[in-house]
Amino acid sequence: MTFKEQVIESIEIPENAQKIVLFLDQQGLNEIQPQWKQFARLNNRIEAYLLMNEKNPLFMKEKIDQLVPIEFSFAKVITEETVQEVLSNQTIGTYLLLGCDSELVRTIKRQAIEIGFSEQEMRLLQVGEKKEKLFCVKCYHYNNLTDEHTVVCNHCQTKLDVSEHYSRVKEAYLGYIAI
């Protein structure tokens, strides 16, 4: 399923959300555009943060009006380093919508949970290729997940069976020692 399909099918903004905070990178902003009308009805309750990083260094304040066709109560270009500060200043009833590459989504989600957001208060829309990891239960190192049912750990060379169990704590699938 593409990001656009995820957006179209799964954006559910709860009626009790006091405010919606969007964190979007360049690709997320481009791909979420078909849904602007849905957000337009909530314009007085939306804050948009456009994330500037080494992948999209040219996000400029002047471009926001061209890229975002609806009025927000607040729109700002920020860096990844200031995300935690933005999250810390939110009030109860704030709902987060993250449209970024998978690594950035994981980082922001982790920061939001540390601050006190629950997973129910977040909608995660990962943009681009999602890089899944495999956690070796012998040496505790991460490996890239492939389509194979068994993987040899890059660190300890142990043959691992790929489990269907995804650890939210490790943010990886578990690789058990193959017998």
Image (cartoon, rainbow, N blue to C red):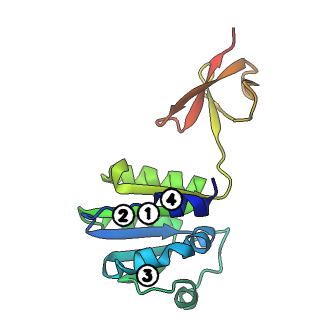
Helix, strand or loop under label 1: strand
Give the residue pinned by disc 4.
9
Helix, strand or loop under label 3: strand
Of marks 1 and 4, which one's residue comes earlier in the chain? 4
Q: Which-is-in-front pick, marks 1 and 4?
A: 4
* Disc 4 packing (10 Å; few <14; some 14–19; many ≥20): few
Q: Position of residue 80 (x, y in %)?
A: 52, 65
Of marks 3 and 1, which one's residue comes earlier in the chain? 3
Between 124 and 7, the one nearer to me in the picture: 7
Give the residue pinned by disc 3.
75
What amino acid does circle 1 point to? Answer: Leu
Question: Is the residue under label 1 in contact with that under label 2 (CB below 8 Å)?
Answer: yes
Please tell me the numbered disc located at residue 13: 2
Real-space Cα separation, disc 4 to disc 3, in angstroms: 25 Å
Q: Position of residue 147 (x, y in %)?
A: 74, 33
Of marks 4 and 3, which one's residue comes earlier in the chain? 4
Real-space Cα separation, disc 3 to disc 1, in angstroms: 14 Å
Real-space Cα separation, disc 3 to disc 2, in angstroms: 19 Å
What amino acid does circle 2 point to? Answer: Ile
Give the residue pinned by disc 1.
97
